[in-house]
Amino acid sequence: MNTNELKKRYADGEQNFTAADLSGASLNWINLSGANLSRTDFYGAQLSGANLSQANLSAANLSGADLSRADLSGANLEGADLQGANLNNTNLTAAVYNQLTKFPQGFEPSKIGMLNSEQIKEQAAQTTSPPVVLADRTSTPTEDLNRTVVNSLGAHQVYQTTPFENSIPIPKLESAFTEQVPFPNPTAYGSSNSTPTATGSKGSEDLKKLTIAGSVIGAAIIIGFLITKNFQSTHQNNQIITKNNASEQPAQSVTIQTSPPQLRGNIMIGDWEGSFGLNSQESSTISITSESGQTFQGTLYTVGNKGGKFRIAIEGEINLNSRLVTIREVEILSKPSEESWFLGMNTGTVSSDFRQISGTGKDPRGNKYTWSFYRK
């Protein structure tokens, strides 16, 4: 695949150039942002000022390539070979690498903002929190009172579970008073001065049972009141916990984002050097001379297909949040008499450090092309 074919296919919207042979190719200032270049051979290629941001360069051979002033921000470099590559002023912010990536001797990727994909995965696994599980409330306050008890009055024992483990056990009296207690008969003791018989002892025991039963019932009423208050308080706390957890979102996969720098004053004003159009072997320049808010004006200096020099007035806008750039060719200021020019519309992006712009264009005749410029 030659350089012109690559540019044309990319300008037509193609993104997949996996395992292409571009060794030794002259690709200065080319725009291949977001392209799939996995396992592509760039050995010894000229990629100075190239826009390879967000490109997939996994397992690509970039050894000996000239990547000076190129934009590789956010690119995937897992398993790529960059040994002997020229990385002078290369933008590698948020580019991803792993233990298989090979760098020039002495190069330290972490110091220039590159990201280790293996560390990102490990951190993501460590920061994922387990979900909060709330107890399922299935019983009523009345049912909570029926817990395992020891009935000192011989009542039937009742067994029932409840989600609140700190509830106080309360007896459910089912048979404490099923047996009728006879009232003592004075004639059973003989005369009023007679010594009581064994029957009198039974009446005394029954009286004790009545006393104990009354105490247990009173305690049950008090404890039942306390448990009801405890349930209301616990129910309110559960509602608060549920509301708080409802507002929390589950942990998501880690996403790396780069924020635009804090820019002051003029953003686009200055001279931008690079390539423009199908004749990318010739150097072109955009000189932006005025700026107001997010709009700017200037002049494009470029070379036509036959080598003639053109001077084109341009107007443009830049969105600082999305970093999208639009450049309109509005007037031909000068051109060679033997060549023609059709004013086109150009769209692209500016790099995260606001030092490189690149994109694609289309003229009224339907011709598509790429362009890329680097701020001097």
Image (cartoon, rainbow, N blue to C red):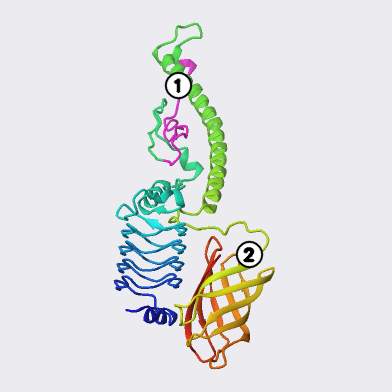
What residue is at 60 percent from the left and 81 percent from the top? 328
When the figure is inspected, residue 285 is found, relative to residue 141, above or below; the finding is below
What residue is at 42 percent from the left and 72 percent from the top? 32
- Give me the disc on residue 267: 2
Q: Nearer the viewer, residue 191 or 224?
A: 224
The magenta segment: 162-187
Could you give the CA–CA distance between mark 2 and mark 1, rounded to whole angstroms?
Answer: 100 Å
What residue is at 56 percent from the left and 82 percent from the top? 345
Q: Percent from the top left, x then y, of residue 233?
A: 57, 39
The answer to whether 150 appears left or right of 375 in the picture is left
- Dot 2 falls on a residue whose secondary structure is loop
Q: Nearer the viewer, residue 329 or 156?
A: 329
When the figure is inspected, residue 354 is found, relative to residue 198, above or below; the finding is below
Q: Nearer the viewer, residue 198 or 233?
A: 233
Q: Percent from the top left, x then y, of residue 364?
A: 54, 90
Q: Earlier in the sequence, mark 2 or mark 1?
A: 1
List the residue tagged with mark 1. 206
- Dot 1 falls on a residue whose secondary structure is helix
